[in-house]
Image (cartoon, helix red, strand yellow):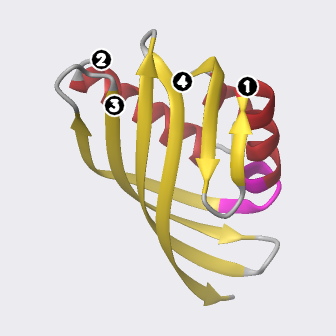
């Protein structure tokens, strides 16, 4: 994967999050991809990723902004590391969340085959 291809996939990730689009997010992942959130555990394949997004993003967030801060690729383009900032309203807990995240993506067939995300959040009650 090239840097330009990786940025395009991360841009799609950001658009899917901003638009709360659980179908769009699947377009950047291989059908058998894994998605690991340290608070929610591992989701497997498109079905698991979509269910996670339906619950965590579509069902519990709004007013989302996303900004890619940094992006790194390993020499063979098989691992992408992205750093971003996202801000959103958690509608379940009635909080404004400012999230700084680093995500590590495995790459296969010009898509992401895995995601492990690690983040720090600042929470402000609404």
Of 85 and 42, which appears nearest the observer?
A: 42
Label 3 environment density (alpha carbons within 10 Å; few <14, some 14–19, many ≥20): many
Mark 3 lies on a secondary structure that is strand
Which residue is the site of mark 4?
Answer: 28
Residue 32: percent from left, percent from top: 66, 20
Magenta stretch in the rendered image = 56-62
Per the rendering, the mark at residue 46 is 1
Disc nearer the start of the sequence (1/2): 2
Task: Identify residue for label 2.
Answer: 1
For marks 3 and 2, give the CA distance.
9 Å
Badge 1 or badge 4: first in the primary sequence: 4
Q: Earlier in the sequence, mark 4 or mark 3?
A: 4
Residue highlighted by disc 3: 79
Q: Report, in whole angstroms, how far the alpha carbon at label 1 lies from the one at label 2.
A: 21 Å
Residue at 26% in and 43% down:
71
**Do the residues under discs 3 and 1 have CB atoms within 8 angstroms?**
no
């Amino acid at each position: 994967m090239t840097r330009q291809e990786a940025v395009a996939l991360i841009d799609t990730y950001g658009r899917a999050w901003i638009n709360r689009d659980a179908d769009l997010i699947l377009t950047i992942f291989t059908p058998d991809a894994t998605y690991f959130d340290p608070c929610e555990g591992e989701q497997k394949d498109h079905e698991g990723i979509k269910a996670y997004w339906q619950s965590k993003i579509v069902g519990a967030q709004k007013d989302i902004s996303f900004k890619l801060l940094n992006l790194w690729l390993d020499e063979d383009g098989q691992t992408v590391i992205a750093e971003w900032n996202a801000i959103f309203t958690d509608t379940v807990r009635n909080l404004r969340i400012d999230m700084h995240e680093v995500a590590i993506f495995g790459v296969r067939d010009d898509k992401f085959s895995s995601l492990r995300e690690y983040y720090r959040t600042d929470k402000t009650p609404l």
